Amino acid sequence: MTSTSLHREPIRVGVVGLSASGGWAATAHVPALAGLDGYELRALSASSAESARAAGEKYAVPLAYGSAQELARSEEVDLVVVTVKVPHHLELIRPALEAGKMVFSEWPLGADLAQAEELSDLAHRRGVLTAVGLQARSAPPLRYLRDLVADGYVGRVLSTSMLGSGWIGGATYDDTYAYLLDGTSGATLLSIPFGHSVDALTMVLGEFCEVSALIENLRPEVTHVTSGAVAAKTAEDQIAVTGVLESGAVAAMHIRGGTSRATAFHWEINGTDGDLVVKADQAQWWYGGLRLSGARGAERTLAELPVPARYQRSLTQWTGRSTEPACNVAHAYALLRDQITGNLAPDEDGVPDFRHAVRRHRMLERIREAARTGRKVTLAEQGS
């Protein structure tokens, strides 16, 4: 977090971008907050006063504002949650920071590194507490995986390999996601699927110290799912990164555009004494539904590794619901609540803040540089 601020519960939440027609806020944030102790969904803002009123009625939110600026000024809001498309983050997060409000922004923080730096610097100057939605870090299976590695389950880590389908960058598009075709939108295969994936990898195994990369756009034209219209695509659809982690382990990541009939997500960690495998059946694996397996010593066959109950943070309402998009977001909110109220355990890290987001944005820029120049790039300064 950007700063420590003790706060009495409930934490009054205002969501920027909650729409009666659906979207990520309705799919993930509203269910995540429902029934979670310590929060009250108090306000929302939408693109107009009319749409805000409709959303307020649908989700039973008492305060509905026609702009993010109005919501940011409200004395009824403690935490502003920004869930809109990446190109609008800067203009909608800035008013909340200027009003001195705590802010939880979806990832990516900005459309580019410069925007992320601007928002992080403003949050630092205002001394406000911030969080960014890299929710894989809050997922119980990954927090357990990190502990398994740290406790020596595989011995010394020798290598890791991650193969994923990115959903973004497929052969078709629709009106809702047409903006993803633009490589300058800030919402690309590199920033979203790869960003979530590499952040999870570094959480478990540590940062990269050097990388080589290939970033390609092999589908420069894509087809509208209903009309059949062909549109130009400038955003990448293939990312392959190899490198060395600070531990000395070798890492390889390949994130492919669209979906695959064969593999949605597969991650191996191989060590001197054992192996760990993480799998998911959906391209957006950071939403949830992860399965862990492993084997070590004389064991020759991988066995399922159930996540111990202590990693669930008493969120019993999410038992058996790990595949829902709101699950990991709910765990992120639980961590954030404990940070805000000063109840986070001394040995537990919370959700990443804007400064962390800047480090991750900077890493992605260095990966682009490696792909553009065809040279190995060092990332020694990228420690989290």
Image (tube, grey):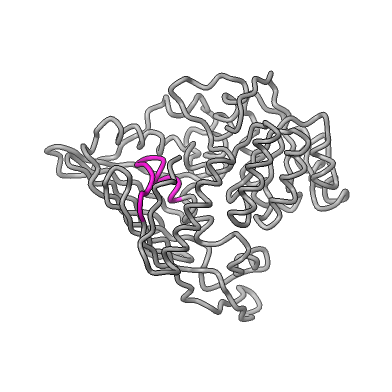
Q: Is residue 246 above or below residue 375?
A: above
So how many labels did they put on this image? 0
Q: Is residue 25 above or below residue 230?
A: above
Give residue 23's position: percent from left, percent from top.
Answer: 67, 52
With 318 as the anchor, is 374 left or right in this view? left
What stretch of residues is rendered in magenta? Answer: 197-210
Give residue 137's position: percent from left, percent from top.
Answer: 47, 39
With 321 as the anchor, is 142 left or right in this view? left
Instruction: State the quadrant of the C terminus.
Output: top left
Q: Is residue 235 above or below residue 133?
A: below
Front one among 106 and 38:
106
Outermost residue toward the right? 50
Q: Quadrant of residue 347?
A: top left
Residue 204 part of the magenta-drawn span: yes
Q: Is residue 31 above or below residue 309?
A: below
Residue 20 part of the magenta-drawn span: no
Secondary structure mainly formed by the magenta segment: helix
Please tell me which residue is depicted at 53% across the width and 38% down the height of the picture: 352
Please tell me which residue is depicted at 49% across the width and 50% down the height of the picture: 196
Front one among 175 and 344:
344
Give residue 323's position: percent from left, percent from top.
Answer: 49, 44
Q: Quadrant of residue 305?
A: top left
Please tell me which residue is depicted at 67% across the width and 27% down the height of the picture: 39
Instruction: State the quadrant of the N terminus.
Output: top right
